[in-house]
Image (cartoon, helix red, strand yellow):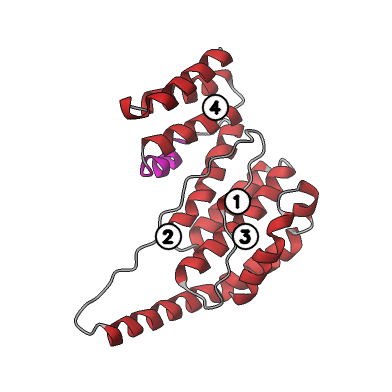
Amino acid sequence: MHLARHFWNTCRSSIKRKLERSLLFDPLNELIHHINTVAPKSIVASRNEKEIALKEEKPNTTESFKPKKQPLINKKDKKNVSIDDDQTQITSVISNPQEDAQIRSVLYGVLVQIYMDKHSWHSALDVIDNALQVLPRTQHRLLLYKYRVLIKSKLGLSISTDMQKFREQGELALARMWREVAIMAKKRDHVINAYQQAIATLQVTHSVFRIEFEILFLEFG
């Protein structure tokens, strides 16, 4: 995972541009393949080492491993979905399960973006499905669920199951996701439904955002 961390920190500046992203296609596929070969064992080993260390320091207490919450992706550029602003540089030298999961998720995210750049929507969905099968169940997977929702919206497919993931993040996160669905969707009735869902999701506590979405809905109509 040290090599994967170095690769990510090196290529972060390149993923902003479509052409440079495309050059990462083969290296990404190869790196992801090798990570999936060894990562499950290394993650378990790292977790066991951490648990042993905790027991030595606190023999009478135990701590549950809890993933840190990550902010929902929120892009100003409506048409260009990118992960760069949502991930920080990973500088830790010592591997740990959370950083390993973050790196694996963002690498898959870049690979999905490359397929999206080529409008290879179904190939992108295949990559996401594979990623969700092998990645640890942490908050970092939310990035891939977002891509899956947006791609399915583009193709006119059902997103009801995937949207449940964002419901768990709170009503504002869910409303923002519905707004992105409205931007990505092609069919008029799907766009209308997405805006209506975004508005209905927000309660009085988020009245400012609700008004914003209502204005966007009126502009669309």
Residue 107 marker: 3
Going from N to C along the chain, the mark reached first, 3 or 4, is 3
Going from N to C along the chain, the mark reached first, 3 or 1, is 3
Task: Identify the magenta region.
Answer: 159-169
Q: In this view, does 179 lie to the left or right of 58?
A: right
Report the residue that reaches farthest toward the front.
Answer: 208
Going from N to C along the chain, the mark reached first, 4 or 1, is 1
**Pointer 1 local density, CA inside 10 Å: few below 14, some 14–19, many at least 20:** few
Residue found 54% across the figure and 50% down from its top: 144
Q: State the residue position of label 2.
A: 137
**Pointer 4 local density, CA inside 10 Å: few below 14, some 14–19, many at least 20:** many
Q: Distance between the residues labelled 2 and 4?
A: 28 Å
Closest to the observer: 33 or 217? 217
Going from N to C along the chain, the mark reached first, 2 or 3, is 3
What amino acid is at disc 2? Arg
Q: Does the magenta stretch include residue 153?
A: no
- Labels 2 and 3 touching (C-beta < 8 A): no
Q: How far apart are marks 2 and 1 (CA)?
A: 18 Å
Closest to the observer: 63 or 42? 63
**Could you say which quadrant of the image residue 10 lies in?**
bottom right
Residue found 51% across the figure and 19% down from its top: 192
* Residue 176 position in % (x across, y down): 48, 34
Q: State the residue position of label 1.
A: 126
Q: Which one is in front in this view, the residue at disc 3 or the one at disc 1?
A: 3
Q: Is mark 2 on a helix, strand or loop?
A: loop
Q: State the residue position of label 4.
A: 182
Q: How far apart are marks 4 and 1 (CA)?
A: 23 Å
